[in-house]
Image: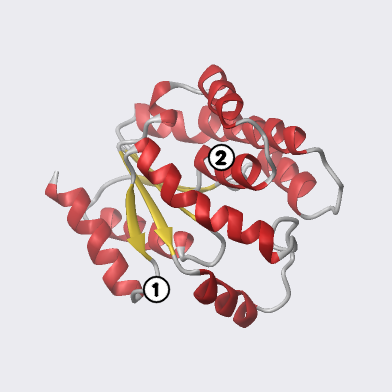
Amino acid sequence: MYIVIEGQDGTGKSTQAELLKNHFESQGKTVVMLEEPDGDLPQAHDLHDMILTRGYDLEPITNVLLFTAARVELWKKIAEPALKEGGIVISARNYWSTLAYQGYGEGVSRSKIIRLTKEMLPEKYVHPDYGFILIVSDEVRLARQKNRGKATETFEKKPNTFQQKVNAAYPHIAKEFGLTLIDASATIEEIFAKLQAIIEHD
């Protein structure tokens, strides 16, 4: 089973992914958790740094290509082997982030992003078993970013107009791909209960 939890910075993706991981492991299941585009894989980590922490002024399409390269490495080296052995893969982010940030935010053709992803990655990656998007209002997002302190990554440092474009993109992405939108202004426990109910209902 491949599960993706998506959303903008500060929506609690990693927290929910970790809770799901613990939940499944308590049932005796093997779980791998990824955080794209890093995922604790050295080559993916280097690509992550190139895009997000080194301060390079990269072209938007270059960001798309680098993110996709990192995804290929994570999928082939970590996710795919785990799934073949019957494990569960839980990912905080997937290519929907690139649609939001590079597509809606930076203006790269969304059809080009989707086409590239489909060419480079298998159907299982493109269409996870479960896909969730955590959303919050711009007001809540700004308050959380303020509480977290100074932004450290490239896209977190972009002006609020860019962040608003990204935030507004996620409901469109959810509708296009049939994903479940969850209000991330709820408590951690309430959000997890919704995720768990949807997965276990099936």
- Residue 157 in percent (x, y) is at 75, 63
Q: Secondary structure at mark 1?
A: loop
Total count of labels = 2
Residue 90 appears in the rendering: no
Q: Secondary structure at mark 2?
A: helix
Instruction: Report the front residue among 35 and 5.
Output: 5
> Is residue 191 shown left or right of residue 100?
left
> What residue did someone put label 2 on?
99
The N terminus, quarter of image: top left
> Is residue 109 shown left or right of residue 167?
right
Residue at image coords 73%, 32%: 61
- Residue 13 in percent (x, y) is at 46, 59
In the image, residue 145 above or below residue 13: below
Cα distance between the residues tagged 1 and 2: 23 Å
Residue at image coords 18%, 57%: 197
Residue type at the position of mark 1: Ser
The C terminus, quarter of image: top left
The colour scheme used to paint the residues is secondary structure
Residue type at the position of mark 2: Leu
Instruction: Report the front residue among 5 and 169.
Output: 169
Q: Give the crowd class for mark 1: few <14, some 14-19, many >=20 residues within 10 Å.
A: some
Q: Give the crowd class for mark 2: few <14, some 14-19, many >=20 residues within 10 Å.
A: many
Residue 131 appears in the rendering: yes
Badge 1 or badge 2: first in the primary sequence: 2
Residue at image coords 79%, 45%: 50
Spot the residue most to the top: 119
> What residue did someone put label 1 on?
185
- Residue 96 in percent (x, y) is at 50, 41
